[in-house]
Image (cartoon, rainbow, N blue to C red):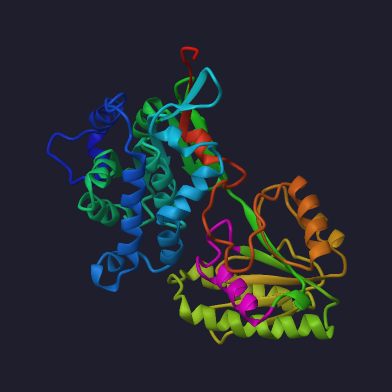
Amino acid sequence: MSSAVEFAYPAPSAARSIEDSLAKLSAHGGAGPVDFRGRLSALGELSRMILAPGSGLRDKLPREGLAFLASFLDSDFLLGQIARELKDVDSLSGFVRINARKSLRTVPKGLVCHWVAGNVPLLAVFSWAMSAVLGNRNFIRLSARQGDVLSPLLDALHGVSEAGARMADETQVVWFDRHNREAHEAMSRAADVRIAWGGREAVDAIRDLPAGWHCEDVIFGPRFSLAVVDPAFIDAGGIRRLATDVAVFDQLACSSPQHIFVKGARGSAGFTAFLEAFNAAFAQQSKTYPRHALDFGETYRIVLDRARALLDGCDVFHDARTDWTVVAADAPSTTLDCANRFVQVIPFERVEDVYPHIPRNVQTVVTRLGPEDAEQFTEHAAHLGVCRFPAPGEGNHFENPWDGVGLVSRLTRSVVRTDPGD
């Protein structure tokens, strides 16, 4: 089994096996208090290195989503995300009083095992960073379809500080085939937390693996996202940022809008003005963010869906190749594959008209509406399953909670102590 596992970080040794690596990480438990502030500072320095043109680090990472990653690793941002769940972040460094006789301590769960999907390589970094800053050890299995974005970051982190070096030393990055059942089981049995990113088949396979009774599962499965906007409340900058939400990950990220609902009748002045502005912005952003190379099947599907939309009476706008496509339709089509920068724009008169088109696997709805519509829509749509209502340009910002899951509570344990009375 071990010969089929490729160790990406740290550099492999002659006698390495997946069992030995997992055992080594598991043995780190109980090694003493976690320097939470030091880890936070180290990730902040890593954020600055990503943004610094002369550091060389950014040249080793994919351009797509790099600004999102740097923003997420910023110390103040991470601290704010953690503080959303913890009443007192100082409990990550020691016991803090919660009343006259009780103190609370927040400690890491232990070994977090990550299964990362191949569609967006940077996903591995988001879940790793939140886990590592809270003091967990991490074992990460990358998809064979993705490059290794973690090793350059871990190499850089090792030289930042003692806390940074410890986070890097407590991380193992590997590749192995999806059919390697024994390797998957070894990861799962060792895990205190399992984090799985991917499609339905992939996450179901991981959930079916044997695990300890105490093991916590955090599943980021297949999701659908959309946008709802009122042309009267979105300006040219907002439209450009919305186009970025669609373009930046080629709609491979679950948080990228696939349908855009626009207030106003199809063909009305407001709807038409929005459509023209969005098409121009989408074309520009598609040049700004180079896409992945399409294979024959992806290209064929785009051309076929353009033809289907035309035959259905839709208005179809696109470039001379297959870089971007916008379909204006009276209602969303379930036969069109909204991916690879292929988006449907649908009119609505009242926000109630949108509710039937929100699927059960919804994640994000990028929203720009008037105050009354926004309040009514977000309240009702939240009960339909929507997890996030970001502003245009923030659709792909990774934040806590994600997919409705509070990550900090899943990655830590709370310990209560009774103190002597005064």
Residue 136 lies, in percent from the top left, at 37, 35
**Any part of residue 413 in sight:** yes
Q: Residue 319 magenta-drawn?
A: no
**Residue lying furthest left:** 14
Q: Position of residue 110 (x, y in %)?
A: 38, 29
Depth order, front residue of 313/396 = 396
Give the residue at x 46% y 62%: 68
> 367 and 96: which one is in front?
96
Residue 340 or 351: which is nearer the viewer?
351
Residue 164 in the image, given as x and y percentages of width and height: 27, 47
Q: Which residue is nearer to you in this view: 196 or 133?
A: 133
Q: Is residue 337 visible?
A: no
Quadrant assignment, res 210? top left
Q: Is residue 76 left or right of residue 283?
A: left
Q: Is residue 166 above or below residue 292?
A: above
Q: Which residues are magenta?
A: 235-256
Quadrant of the snapshot with the N terminus: top left
Left or right placement of residue 388 versus residue 315 in this view = left
